[in-house]
Amino acid sequence: MRGQLILIEGLDRSGKSTQSVKLHESIKDSFIVKFPDRSTRIGSIINEYLTNEDFKLPDQSIHLLFSANRWEVIQDMIDKLNNGHTIILDRYIYSGISYSLSKSQLSNTKNEMSDVDWLYSPDKGLPKPDLTLFLSLELDQINSRAEFGEERYEKTEFQKIVKSNFLKILPQEGVKILNVNDKSIEEVQKMIWEIIEQGDYNKLTNNPISYFT
Ligand code: T5A
């Protein structure tokens, strides 16, 4: 029996971290893993990139660093799942693909960054979430959230493209898109909990971990 892997995805400031904490509080012995994990050495480069627009890196490099940052912690995640802990992921590979793809579209460039297979390939081999929740929110509501605009990708035009890419690349299976417009933190928490309870995602499972191939 193992714990389940639950992913919360969404645009910047859509409430992922808030809901990850709420879910963690409701599921005994669970852990939150947030990406990017800014506490590692790779994570500190990512943090510098996100917070300092003068820090130049080729788009391909930062894309690969986001993936490397996931690989850094993956064995620990797998061990925790196998030891019966639920893991709540705050962003994962779908963020990696959607944000990078949006950069090529914004600049109207055709290169590796516009190639979904290329963007996806460094994440092949990572464990697949048992459940993915996408918090869907109108852009005007995100704009008004505290601290929106402080980091590199927090621009309305860009987030609009990211949202459409998320909706294109998220798989059909195992994904729930939650419309959280005008919903309070508690209302979103309730929506999420209903899905968790209905699917027994708060309980251990016999299913083996599956991996992105
Ligand atoms: N990125 C990430 C990539 O390009 N590639 C990758 O592979 C990965 C993993 C940083 C950036 O990195 C990019 C995407 C990002 O641009 P991040 O650190 O996850 O990624 O950055 P954010 O998404 O901005 O993280 P935040 O923690 O700031 O946003 P959250 O978690 O979505 O939002 P949260 O919960 O912190 O809430 C934001 C504010 O809204 C309020 C909260 O109280 C808070 O003030 N709030 C609500 N207000 C009203 N109603 C509700 N329902 C609310 N829920 C929350």
Image (cartoon, grey):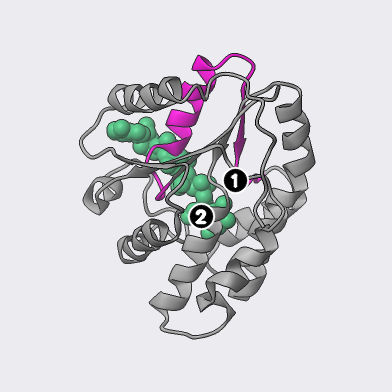
- Is residue 167 rendered to the left or right of residue 126? left
- Taking the magenta stretch, the answer to whether it contains residue 35 is yes
Amino acid bearing label 2? Ser
Task: Give the total of numbered labels.
Answer: 2
- Is residue 127 rendered to the left or right of residue 19? right
- The numbered mark at residue 95 is 2
Quadrant showing the N terminus: top right
Asked if one can make out residue 56 in the rendered structure from this viewpoint, the answer is no
User: Residue at coordinates 61% horizontally, 53% vertically from top-left?
Assistant: 47
* Cβ–Cβ under 8 Å for marks 1 and 2: yes
Tell me the residue that label 1 is attached to. Answer: 35
- Above or below residue 114? Residue 77 is above
- Which circle's residue, 1 or 2, is located before the other in the chain? 1
- Above or below residue 139? Residue 100 is below
Q: CA distance from mark 1 to mark 2?
A: 9 Å
User: Residue at coordinates 41% horizontally, 76% vertically from top-left?
Assistant: 105
Helix, strand or loop at label 1? It is loop
Residue 160 percent coordinates (x, y)? 31, 62
Amino acid bearing label 1? Phe
Where are the magenta residues, as a range? 10-38
User: Residue at coordinates 61% horizontally, 29% vertically from top-left?
Assistant: 4
Residue 182 percent coordinates (x, y)? 20, 36
Q: Mark 1, mark 2: which one is toward the viewer?
A: 2
Mark 1 C-beta to ligand 1 under 8 Å = yes
User: Residue at coordinates 63% horizontally, 24% vertically from top-left?
Assistant: 205
- Is residue 112 rendered to the left or right of residue 76? left
